[in-house]
Image (cartoon, rainbow, N blue to C red):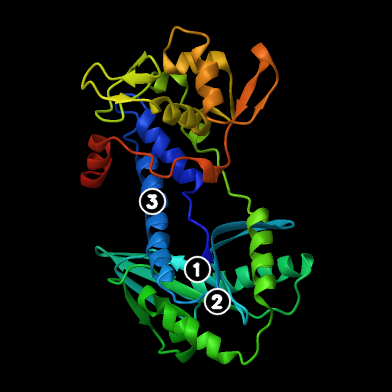
Amino acid sequence: MFENYRKKSYDLLIYEALLRRLKGNFWFNDKIITGYKKEKAGYDGERAVDYTISTFRSNDFVILKGLRLNNPPFYFQIDTLILTKKFICILEIKNYKGIFSYDSKQHQLTQKVNGKTKSYKDPILQAEAQKNHLKTWLVHHGFFNLPIETLVVVAYPSTIIENMHQDASVYNKIIHTASLQLQIERLNNLYLKDSMNISSVHEIGRQLQQSDEPLRTNIVQQFGFNEHHFKEGVLCTNCNKSPMKRLYKKWLCPECQNTDAKAHEQVIFDYFLIHGDTITNSQCQQILKIKSSRTPHTLLTGMDLRKSGNNRTRNYHAPASQCYPQKSYIPANRLMRIQQESPN
């Protein structure tokens, strides 16, 4: 079984960067915290399903996670795609908690949690729309008549799923993660013949990965922040104080004496996420708060970033979203406050 590693979305990376870099109490903003929690909950739910899939015993599957594809004039997103020799299966992953009630007559989903009720789009119809987009995409890329199935997967086992009208077809469409392998086996047994060989499975997977275009929204501009709202200098990766001081080939925190050879990298990645897709040597020198004009060139070159221009006009370009650090931290005191409080 081949499966790619799920990466954080651009939006989640940006929210994490804001929670690291904003000065004072600017980060404690209702929209920032709500946006971060929404992105993080979605990512955690998808990772929970990823773990279940990783236990499948099959060498014939290709698993692709977090695809965003162009089907002109539209883009469509697929949380997880399972490719087999017999069929393709789209997983629409939901991270809802509480009571999850599906009305198959009104095509409506409601969620009840902590005494509040919210309504959402019909997840089965969402998955079917993705199915139609994917069929068109496959035809445009030379793959015809491939059976596509859809499943809505509720990530958390504590969520109660209510099938309001006891619709028999819904039981095989909206499932808990624990039932996923049984449902894949059920679908596999429906098809008596292979629709493609394993080489075709891998070729479709390769083309899908190459066509992936992650979404990047302009979150920072929505808040109206400017450079004065953000910390400069290298944050200590141990105590989060700034700035760390540059010594020979490493950074030293004056507060806790922690040293780190690559502490500058997160600062530069955060610059890309917050301020733009390129950085110059002089901009790097400013954000790292260092005196040497040669050091930024050495540090940026060491990150193996794509570059353009020469000498003073040289720009270093942001990496693709999947190349950002996936274990980027949020200061413990800020994370604790997010978990314990909510802004007014």
Q: CA distance from mark 1 to mark 3?
A: 17 Å
Q: Judge by depth and name the residue closer to the eye, 238 or 173.
A: 238
> In the image, 3: left or right of 262?
right
Q: In the rendered structure, which amino acid carries the disc numbered 2?
A: Thr
Tell me, for residue 40, which label it has, or none.
Answer: 3
Q: Earlier in the sequence, mark 2 or mark 3?
A: 3
Q: Position of residue 22 (x, y in %)?
A: 37, 27
Q: Please identify the quarter of the rendering in which residue 318 is found.
A: top right
The correct choice, above or below, for 89 with respect to 20 in the image is below
Q: Which residue is mark 1?
A: 92
The correct choice, above or below, for 194 with respect to 31 in the image is below
Tell me, for residue 150, which label it has, or none.
Answer: 2
As helix, strand or loop, the secondary structure at mark 1 comes to: strand
- Badge 1 crowding class, 10 Å Cα cut-off, few under 14, some 14 to 19, many 20 or more, is many
As helix, strand or loop, the secondary structure at mark 2 comes to: strand
Q: Position of residue 157 (x, y in %)?
A: 30, 72
Q: Earlier in the sequence, mark 1 or mark 3?
A: 3
- Badge 2 crowding class, 10 Å Cα cut-off, few under 14, some 14 to 19, many 20 or more, is many
